Amino acid sequence: MAVIDPAEEIGELTGTLRGIQDVLDVDALRKQVVDLEAQAAAPDLWNDPEQAQKVTSKLSHLQSEINRVESLSRRLDDLPVLFELAAEEGDEDALAEAEKELASLKSDIGALEVRTLLAGEYDSREALVTINSQAGGVDAADWAQMLMRMYLRWAERHGYGTEVYDTSYAEEAGIKSATFVVKTPYAYGTLRGEHGTHRLVRISPFDNQGRRQTSFAGVDVVPVVEQTDHIDINEDDLRVDVYRSSGPGGQGVNTTDSAVRITHLPTGIVVSCQNERSQLQNRASAMAVLSAKLLERKRQEEAAAMNELRGESTTSWGTQIRNYVLHPYQIVKDLRSGVEAGNPTAVLDGDLDEFIEGEIRWMRRQEAH
């Protein structure tokens, strides 16, 4: 087996990191940080809490991006010294430590490189995620709830804010559906590859005979609408129903008709929100969800029309995308990128980064063809 020269690998990584810095335009990011810091210091910032949240969230994200690049650059500068010291002293432990750091840097720079692939029109947006139980009865409802927990744990691991807009609980266990927002820049670009059907194979905890059960849940990911988007919604096209919130919640949430369901009659899209005490707040949140779904529908229609003009077929990722097998063996495998993991427990606890990076690279390859 050919021995790889660490200096050669370090040189390649240095070139890759420089390319990433050029794509990200770190100097421009620093200017944005200065501007956002000035906005964040304004005494009237919190007069508009929603805008304040956006400013502070974007500032935190950009600072984190810059720190990430600078940290990788420092580690890369230090790496040749680690190898030199290990060679001079003939220290096997020091050499092993230097090789471990080289492998870690490869992984971390690879992960940052994925971020540069998020260049789609809406990739920088926050993400609105909807999960629906599909075939599989009570197991599917339980599976939908497991998926919801997986994404919320993934967001929590990264320090991303989330807000659950609506949860429709199933009768026996689990959920029929849930909608939540992931509040961080580039959440949509990061998560859009999760859109599709997720399949679970396991011994059913709801089957007295302990038989193996296959169940399905659908994940829908759309970008959150911003003020610059032109989404016209005619009030005459809406049917608005109010009802009493259901499922776990505070007494005030469950005893008033504060939950709101909105049906967009021309498209048949139905959205609901029940996480707030106020009917007015729930309506505003439901309208935000409806706007996001209509924006995504408009985007898909425009893409389909453009592809038709070009004589191309529309690529759809809304099919089965990933298998989670808990019995008779344990594996999670993505059917598009080929990424797999032998520890489903860790994946279901939010350890999703390898899958997400794999699908982002896969999507870019598909879009390039």
Image (cartoon, rainbow, N blue to C red):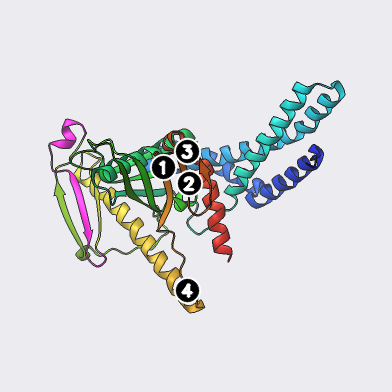
Q: Position of residue 367 (x, y in %)?
A: 55, 63
Nearest to N terminus: mark 3 or mark 1: 3
Label 4 – label 1 distance at C-alpha: 39 Å
Q: Return the residue nearer the eye: 171 or 123.
A: 171
Segment colored magenta: 248-267
Contact flag, marks 2 and 1 (Cβ < 8 Å): yes
**Amino acid bearing label 4:** Met
CA distance separating discs 3 and 2:
48 Å
Please name the residue that numbered disc 3 is placed on.
42
Q: Which residue is mark 2?
A: 333
Looking at the rendered image, the disc whose residue lies closer to the viewer, 4 or 1, is 1
Q: What residue is shown with label 4?
A: 306
Residue 189: image location, x then y, percent: 49, 52
SS at mark 2 in the image: strand
Kind of residue at disc 2: Lys
Judged from the image, the secondary structure of the residue bearing numbered disc 3 is: loop
Tell me the quadrant of the picture where the C terminus can be found.
Answer: bottom right
